Image (cartoon, helix red, strand yellow):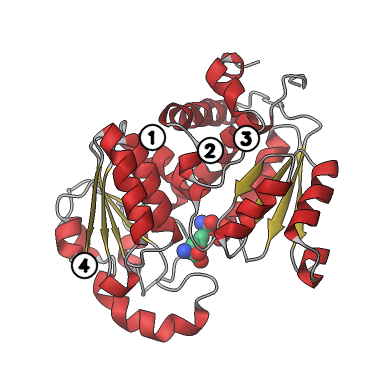
Amino acid sequence: MAPYLDSSLAQALRGRDFLCLRDLSNEELALVLEVAADLKARQKRGVPHRWLAGKTLGMIFQKASTRTRVSFEVGMYQLGGQALFLSARDLQLGRGETIADTARVLSRYLDGLMIRTYAQEEAEELARYASVPVINGLTDLLHPCQALADLFTIKERLGRLAGVKLAYLGDGNNVAHSLLLGGAKVGLDVWVASPPDYAPRPEIVAAAEELAAATGARITVTSDPAVAAADADVLYTDVWASMGQEEEQEIRRRVLAPYRLDSSIVALAKPDVLVMHCLPAHRGEEISDAVIDGPHAVVFDQAENRLHTQKALLLLLLYEGRSNPA
Ligand code: CP
Ligand code: NVA
């Protein structure tokens, strides 16, 4: 068994929910990244780590997904457990059964739940009534699992997190929100450049500033993409219209056009800048083909690291100290 599972930090994580980066202390977040590095190394070397043998994760999806679904499902499998894909279209939830009753019922079968949905409050309600850990697989407000993979990728590439300048350009959405909170917790210098009507939510910026006070992180929100990108170590963008905002696509395309991550923006950043995108990308909109396919892009590392960081999270939340490694 890995020694980190016995530490008091790891034991304190067992049975907890992960709905927001704020659910983890700074030390717990560092542990998740450390465990992810160990699990990635074990997987690459073919060393079994079936510490969740016999455990089952239910995954409720109210929105589409490629990465989240597959990485959670494969992650549970590699940890010796299994995952169930539960489309909200097919669940009684889609026909009016309440979230509370769904949570109570599913808790009788499953060892953990992941939910991708619209309102953050729905994920919170599921967690309130479930007796098993609930993980946020994306809401309109937050995408904390993405931020875990992003922080891991930055650390893997640059060898550090504190003091790194990350500039996020575009829509101040769920991904931007989780980067603000996660970045603040690890001491990143996070800049968000977006048009004023698409700026990150003020309460998230305030929460990030509060977290930043403890770590020395700096949080800056601006409408000037060039100022944000100047000397950046990391440039990040995401789609201009998120899932559920399809009818706003046209106006968003017009207003957000000056925030496109293209070669002229890359030229303002550090010469070895990392270009990041959570994917799926709308090539030619928020990011040019040349940039996403160019030498700076680490977008597929990010996608892969969803697997390793979520395995770390699953292990820390669901492990009970009873399963034998294979
Ligand atoms: N980045 C991400 O969450 O991708 P999916 O929507 O494919 O899960
Ligand atoms: N902001 C995007 C992220 C997709 C992974 C969305 O919510 O659709």
Residue type pointed to by label 1: Glu
The residue that mark 3 highlights is 16
Residue toward you, 153 or 106: 106
Whole-Å distance between the Cαs marked 1 and 3?
A: 26 Å
Residue 87 position within the rendered picture, expressed as x and y whole percent measured from the top left: 74, 63
Of badges 1 and 2, the one in the foreground is 2
Query: Residue 156 has which mark?
Result: 1
Residue 227 position within the rendered picture, expressed as x and y whole percent measured from the top left: 14, 59
Say what secondary structure mark 3 lies in.
loop
Mark 3 within 8 Å of ligand 1, using the beta carbon: no
The residue that mark 2 highlights is 309
Q: Earlier in the sequence, mark 1 or mark 3?
A: 3
Residue type pointed to by label 3: Arg
Around disc 1, counting alpha carbons within 10 Å, would you say few (fewer than 14), some (14 to 19), or many (20 or more)?
some
Residue in the picture at 44% in, 81% down: 249
Around disc 4, counting alpha carbons within 10 Å, would you say few (fewer than 14), some (14 to 19), or many (20 or more)?
some
Q: Earlier in the sequence, mark 1 or mark 2?
A: 1
Q: Quadrant of ligand 1?
A: bottom right
